[in-house]
Image: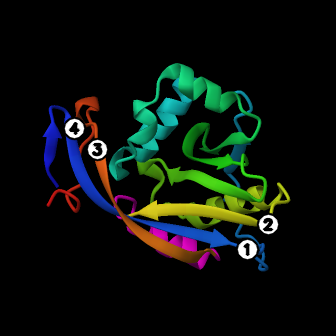
Amino acid sequence: MAATMSGIQEVVVDVTFLRMESRPSGPAPALPADVRVEHARHCSVPFYRYLYDTVGEPWLWWMRRTASDADLAALLALPAVTIHVLVKDGEPAGFYELDRRHPHTVNLAYFGLMPWAIGAGLGRAFLRHAIDTAWAAGRHAVTVNTCTADHPRALPAYISAGFQRLRTVREVWPVPTKLGLRIPSHLAR
């Protein structure tokens, strides 16, 4: 890892690409009675930024932080891109984003829990909700990727849910620390 210019820090991550080619066969774990998933049909840019920034801050989610409001608004206006919010006691506990722009696959573009909801027993059922919603689009496969900046249980959770590992690629990210992002200690070597 090296500094390349003011406000940018290069970070080396291993990105693992996964694919699921058939629906899960077992019953879905139930969400707790006080939890629901809402489709944010007209997700605003500020609300999206709140979800993305809060869920992703510990895991170095930076790419959408560099997008302009106009670019995010255009993305969120696409019928093929949907945002789904996990709600517990009236407040967001996590979200996922599905991207159906490819004719044969649905990509689980983002998935995560709010920091306060991690370890509360919501992850498995919420991930299955995302997978079932992705399969409802009638495509041939569901894809997702994760990396060494993500929560350490992300890759095992995806594999346990039925995704198969395709490949792992080493990438160097130009992380914009000028946006207030902190490099996780396990990547700050």
Of 29 and 69, the residue lying toward us: 69
Residue 168, horizontal then vertical, whole percent = 43, 71
- Asked whether residue 150 is drawn in magenta, I would say yes
Residue located beneath label 4 in the image: 8
Q: Residues within 10 Å of mark 1 (few under 14, many from 20)?
A: some
Helix, strand or loop at mark 1: loop
Q: Are circles 4 and 3 on residues that touch, CB within 8 Å?
A: yes
**Is 80 covered by the magenta stretch?**
no
Disc 3 designates what residue? 174
Badge 4 marks a residue whose secondary structure is: strand
Which of marks 2 and 4 precedes in the sequence? 4
Question: Which portion, as a residue range, is magenta?
Answer: 148-162
- Foreground pick, 150 / 67: 67
Left or right: 55, with 24 as reference point: left
* Disc 3 and disc 1 in contact, CB within 8 angstroms: no
Q: Dot 3, how many residues are within 10 Å of its Cα: few (below 14), some (14-19), or many (20+)?
A: some
Going from N to C along the chain, the mark reached first, 4 or 3, is 4
Q: Identify the amino acid type marked 1.
A: Glu
Amino acid at pointer 3 = Pro
Mark number for residue 21?
1
Which residue is tagged 2? 140
